[in-house]
Every structure is written in C-alpha cells, then in structure tokens.
Amino acid sequence: MTEFGDDVAVVTGAGSGIGRATAGLLHSRGARVVVADINGSSARDVAAELGGGSLAVEVDVSDGRSVKSMIDSAVEAFGRIDVLCNNAGFGMRGTVVTLQEAEWDRLMAVNVKGVFLCSKFAMPHLISSGRGRIVNTSSYTSSVGIADRAAYVASKGAISALTRAMALDHVADGVRVNAVAPGTVDSPYFAAMIAAADNPSALRDELASRSPMHRMGEPAEIAEAIAWLASTRSSFATGSLLVVDGGTSAW
Ligand code: NAI
C-alpha cells in the first residue's frame, strides 16, 4: 500500500513551480493526481511526465463554471476526490496608490475567490471521501508585511483567515483544512522576474537575503510540507498555518 493509497488529489497551479512539485510528489507517493492549471499546455506536459494516474485539466480558478467542470472531470476520471491543493496564485507589485482597480480585482479573483470556488465545488466529494483534506498555499506575507505588494499580501492574509474558517465549518464533516506559508521560493515566477531585472544577480541576492539562511527555497521543499498536510499523517492538524520560510518571519 502506498502512502496515498487510492486517494485522488486535485492540485491547482500544477503546471509550474510549487504546484508542479506537489503534483509530482503526491503522484510518487501513490495518489492519482489532477494536474490543473490555466496554462493547459503546461498542465498537459506535467501530466505526460507523471504518466498513468494523472489527468491534465485546463481551469481558471476564478471562474465558477470552469472550476465546476474541473471537479466534474476529476470525478469522471477517478471516481472520487480526497485531497484539494488550492495552490494557483500569483503576485504583483504595487501599493494602494499605484495598483489599478482591475489589477486588484484580478489578483483577488484568482488568489482568494479561486480558493473559495475550488473548495465549494470539491467539498461534497471531500465529505463523501470520509478523509477529505484541503491544503491552501498562503504565504509568510500573511503574517508579516512586505512593501510594494499590497494586493498580494492582502490576498494571502485572506487565505490564512479562510483556512481557519473552513477548518471550523467542516471539522464535523471529517474534512481537515490547513495552509502552508512558504517564504521566497525559486519558482518560475521569480526566475522570470530575476531574468527580466536590470541587475539579475543583485535581485537574486536581495530575494535570498530575506531569509537568515541567505537563500531562496526550492519548490520541492514546499511540496514536502504540502504533502504532509495532504496526508493522513497530519491527522490532528486542522486550521493550521505551516510556515516554511527559511526563518524569514522569525527575524
Ligand atoms: P508559478 O507562477 O511558478 O506557478 C503558479 C501556477 O498557477 C502557474 O502554472 C499558473 O499558470 C497557475 N495559475 C495562475 N493563475 C491561474 C488561474 N486563474 N487558474 C489556474 N491556474 C492559474 O508560481 P509559484 O511560485 O509556484 O506559486 C504557487 C503558489 O505559491 C501561489 O499561490 C503563490 O502565491 C504561492 N507562493 C509562492 C511563493 C514564491 O516565492 N514563489 C512564496 C509564497 C507563496
């Protein structure tokens, strides 16, 4: 018997970075995995790499119809859903002065409403599972502020708060809801930002210096934490925020 037995896991934002590493880790530990991403071709590439027991689904987590269709596809393919990893999200520079209203709305729609919609449509299946688990990808910035990221920090604060609310709402249903709070992680999101910078090595050093370890995290290091919360080994954890940030929020 593998760690995840006959569990089915839906991972959003699984075409890249932390979501991709999470999909791979859960699959390697025996889960059947729905690789869901707005970028259909990267989702298909990841599912092709994983092989049997995976399914690529193109989804926009901010769109209820698209999310419902993703959940329907997962159940049609695998018959059940035991784990939902609400990982899709993105960051954006800006203060309340410089951010445009449409930018704020889009970020909130993906990062926060996306968690609501995916959880809403997956919940009946997670309850039926009898051992449902949700793991939300929040951020260390839900506990400490960083400059020039007003919408992003607000969205991650909302995810951490929603995690606690959902945990209480569904504890009697046997569904555990937790979140991971990564520090700065060397995912394709930051790789692109570094590559586009005027001075890439200075930006890389600046990002690394957020942590007293003086380095960025790796997607695989966050996937390990998500996988623990997604497993039945974390059976007494619900409503918790597991900070994995190389000590960033400790100093
Ligand atoms: P990434 O950019 O490598 O991966 C994010 C994935 O989400 C992409 O494949 C993208 O296509 C997908 N996505 C974006 N909008 C979507 C939508 N509307 N519907 C479905 N999929 C969508 O980024 P990374 O770094 O792996 O981030 C994953 C999560 O981790 C995000 O929620 C991010 O906020 C969070 N996080 C990342 C940190 C970092 O330093 N990289 C730190 C803390 C949290």
Image (spheres, grey):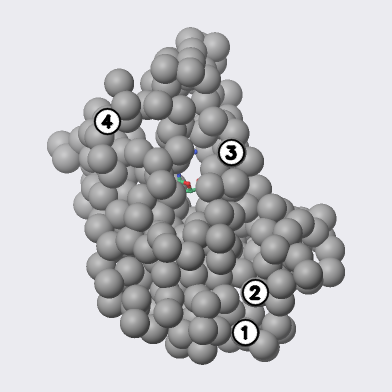
Q: What label does residue 146 carry, if any?
A: 4
Q: Is residue 186 left or right of residue 235?
A: right
User: Crowdedness of circle 2 by 10 Å Cα count: few (<14), some, many (20+)?
Assistant: many
For marks 4 and 1, give the CA distance.
39 Å
Q: Are marks 1 and 2 in contact (CB under 8 Å)?
A: yes
- Residue positioned 54% across, 43% down in the render: 222
Q: Which callout, 4 or 1, points to the residue nearer the camera? A: 1
Q: Quadrant of residue 129?
A: bottom right
User: Crowdedness of circle 4 by 10 Å Cα count: few (<14), some, many (20+)?
Assistant: few
Mark 3 or mark 2: whose residue is earlier in sequence: 2
Q: Is residue 245 left or right of residue 5?
A: left
Which amino acid type corresponds to the residue marked 2 in the rendered image? Val
Which amino acid type corresponds to the residue marked 1 in the rendered image? Arg
- Residue under numbered circle 1: 80
Residue 88 screen position, x and y as percent: 49, 56
Residue 170, compared with residue 9, is above or below; it is below
